[in-house]
Amino acid sequence: MKTVSKLWVGIVFLILLCPLGLLVPEKFRSGAAWGEWGMEEIKEMVGYIPSGLNALSGVWKAPFPDYTFRGWEDKGWGHSCFSYVISAVVGIAVIVVFVFIFGKFLGKKNK
């Protein structure tokens, strides 16, 4: 098996493991993943919301907030797992396209 094929098999395997991000925090009552805190969680942990963070909070809106489609938040575990997998596929596709285009740009031969 070629190295590139092994890479894609590994990526697909990791995509299929994405729903563990739903199970593990719920099973162990661990709360949000590190660095994925909302404003309320930051205020609870630190005691206040830093002014710079508050000013920048509306700059970026995630295409899949909480890794799920809008309106699917309360549809159940199966829908959430599907949303996690789709968000992983979309994220990986964006990265692959970016790297491919960037590689083509940098890989041009000087004539």
Image: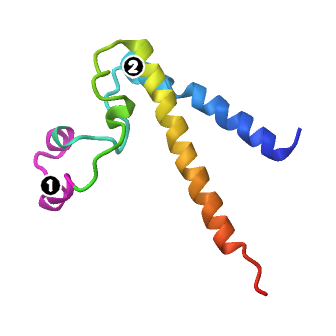
Q: Amino acid at mark 1?
A: Asn
Q: Position of residue 90 (x, y in %)?
A: 51, 40
Taking the magenta stretch, the answer to whether it contains residue 45 is: yes
Q: Which residue is mark 2?
A: 28
Q: Which residue is mark 1?
A: 54
Q: Position of residue 74 (x, y in %)?
A: 28, 16
Taking the magenta stretch, the answer to whether it contains residue 8 is: no
Q: CA distance from mark 2 to mark 1?
A: 30 Å
Q: Quadrant of the N terminus?
A: top right
Q: Quadrant of residue 69?
A: top left
34 on left or right of 46? right
Relative vertical location of residue 7 with respect to residue 103 in this rendering, above or below: above
- Around disc 2, counting alpha carbons within 10 Å, would you say few (fewer than 14), some (14 to 19), or many (20 or more)? few
* Viewer-nearest of discs 2 and 1: 1
The tag earlier along the polypeptide, 2 or 1, is 2
Q: Quadrant of the C terminus?
A: bottom right
Q: Position of residue 48 (x, y in %)?
A: 10, 49
Q: Quadrant of residue 16?
A: top right
* Mark 1: secondary structure: helix
Pick the front one: 31 or 38 = 38
